[in-house]
Amino acid sequence: MAPEGVSVHAARVLLVDGQMFANPPHSDDATELLAALPVRAIVFAYTTSSYLLGSEGEQALKVRLEKRSNGIPVLLPCVAAVAAFRALGVRRIALIHPPWFSDDVNQLGIAYFRTHGFEVAYASQVHPPRKFTEVHPGELYEWTRKQVPAGAEAVFFGGNGLRAIGVISALEEDLGRPVLTANQVAFWYALHQAGVGAPVNGYGRVFRKLSPEGR
């Protein structure tokens, strides 16, 4: 997705004893490592953190991480999704979650977007349930085509570990509505924060919106 002149760097966050990725110190340390590079935006690529923390909690996380980022903005995928839906003029949404998400996390996802004023027309994990592993994009394509109701104005694939980038264009063409993924929409938001106006083609309607304000 990266246009010419844009580079992407990554730092892994260590998961210890079942702690949430957002908990210190590992996410803070990863932020500091990335901030040592000449980057212009940092994405904390963990959808579930927003679901678990809620709006106030994710804002507190952002503030905490930005204390280690040397002023570089830290962005979260769900915040980006909310901005994208608003830029696209979307109100009724469908949520597709990975098969390793629990029912409780699925419900928290519904609550998160409802809190931001969206109507959730559909929300479910991909079935059958399984542990964290790769799900083939073709499976996501077929599941989404069959499950998403006609009344949903857009689709969001939550879960940054879900391989959904490759199905965006095909699903948008088949469904006739915007399709967002956690990684794609976070990248769109990061490009805006970094002041990059170069076009990105083939990865969704959202990139036709030059900014989260819808311009």
Image (spheres, grey):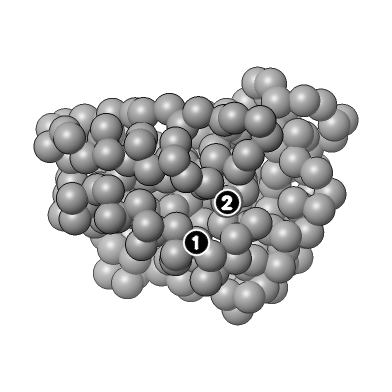
Which residue is labeled 1 in the image?
A: 58
Front residue of 30/115: it is 30
Q: Position of residue 92 (x, y in %)?
A: 65, 70
Residue 194 visible in the current orientation: no
Residue 40 placement, left or right of 149? left
Q: Quadrant of the N terminus?
A: top left
Which image quarter: residue 195? bottom left
Which residue is labeled 2 in the image?
A: 49
Which residue is found at the position 79% from the left and 49% from the top?
A: 124
Q: Position of residue 21 (x, y in %)?
A: 55, 40
The correct choice, above or below, for 102 with respect to 215 in the image is above
Which image quarter: residue 35? top left
Judged from the image, the secondary structure of the residue bearing numbered disc 1 is helix
- Circle 1: is it few (<14), some (14-19), or many (20+) Cα within 10 Å? many
Which residue is found at the position 19% from the left and 55% from the top?
A: 71
Q: Position of residue 202 (x, y in %)?
A: 39, 37
Front residue of 1/159: it is 159
Q: Quadrant of the C terminus?
A: bottom left
- Kindly report the distance in space between the C-alpha atoms of the residues bearing marks 2 and 1: 7 Å
